[in-house]
Image (cartoon, rainbow, N blue to C red):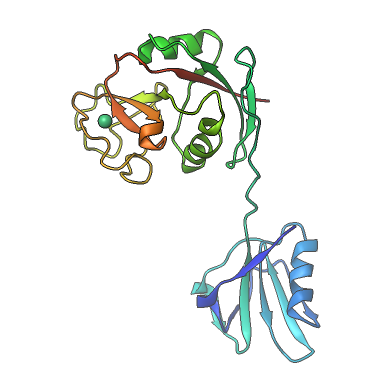
């Protein structure tokens, strides 16, 4: 189902050109319905003319720049649908757990309970099966790892390697200091993406982990240390 939100700073303006179509409608609801039925519509103006109201559809979101004044007019844009996260816990370590993520991608996860591997060993193990080490470079993914994956009974309560390190970075405090094995930047946002105060020791703790003690936010840690499990990940068709 499509929903729309009003853009309050676009009150009382309308466009002259660039619209998909425009027509007279009896009500605001009728205008929203018209936009929904018109597949390529993503925003609309509704100019209330008391029973003879103008409904103007647009394929994109427009700015106030090309607009001119029009009294009793409101502007609505379509809310982007957020895909529902689908997931089943990996109760059987022999199998891959499948997940549909909030960013629209589908991934598979496999848990490895061995704790005697370095981050490099863990990554090599994942690579050997056509996968990669658990990678967290978006807020959607972090949310999934914190609130779904690490809440499973057989995953909860442990420490896990995360793809990425700052090895080779010339400035450890740079926003792109931490990169994944394939060169993606791990966003350096303290207290949001990373645990409170982390990275705390980036010149010695060059790798990344998530653990229950840091609420499964990112934390910098030494690249060789015992007690860390790993989760391999690959995209699902
Ligand atoms: Ca740390």
Q: Nearer the viewer, residue 32 or 141?
A: 141
Residue 1 located left or right of residue 223 = right
Placement of 23 over or under 79, stated as above or below: below
Residue 185 located left or right of residue 19 = left
- Which image quadrant: the C terminus? top right
Residue 62 coordinates in the image, percent (x, y) = 56, 67
What is the quadrant of residue 29 in the picture? bottom right
Residue 99 coordinates in the image, percent (x, y) = 63, 31
What is the quadrant of residue 199 in the picture? top left
Residue 189 coordinates in the image, percent (x, y) = 33, 44
Residue 15 in view, yes or no: no
Q: Residue furthest bottom?
A: 50
Q: Nearer the viewer, residue 6 or 135?
A: 135
- Which image quadrant: the N terminus? bottom right
Placement of 18 over or under 84, stated as above or below: below
The residue shown at (24%, 25%) is 205
Q: Nearer the viewer, residue 6 or 143?
A: 143
| Tally of numbered tags | 0
The residue shown at (53%, 74%) is 66
Residue 22 coordinates in the image, percent (x, y) = 74, 74
Residue 76 in view, yes or no: yes
Residue 36 located left or right of residue 194 = right
The residue shown at (53%, 38%) is 144
The residue shown at (80%, 80%) is 25
Answer with the quadrant where ligand 1 appears in the image. top left
């Amino acid at each position: 189902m499509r929903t729309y939100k009003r853009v309050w700073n676009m009150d009382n303006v309308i466009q002259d050109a660039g619209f998909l179509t425009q027509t007279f409608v009896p009500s605001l609801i009728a205008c929203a319905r018209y936009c929904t039925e018109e597949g390529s519509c993503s925003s609309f103006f509704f100019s209330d003319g008391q029973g003879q109201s103008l409904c103007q559809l647009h394929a994109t979101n427009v700015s106030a720049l090309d607009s001119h004044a029009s009294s009793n007019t409101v502007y609505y844009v379509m809310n982007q649908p957020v895909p529902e996260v689908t997931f089943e816990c990996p109760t059987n370590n022999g199998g891959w757990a499948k997940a549909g993520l909030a960013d629209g991608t589908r991934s598979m996860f496999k848990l490895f309970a061995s704790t005697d591997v370095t981050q490099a060993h863990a990554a090599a193990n994942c690579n050997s099966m056509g996968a990669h080490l658990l990678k967290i470079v978006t807020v959607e993914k972090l949310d999934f790892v914190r609130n779904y994956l690490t809440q499973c009974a057989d995953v909860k309560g442990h420490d896990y390697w995360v793809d990425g390190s700052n090895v080779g970075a010339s400035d450890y405090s740079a926003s792109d200091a931490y990169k994944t094995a394939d060169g993606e930047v791990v966003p350096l946002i303290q207290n949001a993406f990373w645990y409170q105060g982390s990275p705390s020791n980036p010149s010695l703790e060059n790798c990344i982990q998530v653990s229950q003690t840091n609420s499964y936010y990112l934390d910098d840690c030494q690249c060789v240390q015992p007690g860390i499990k790993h989760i391999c990940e690959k995209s699902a068709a």
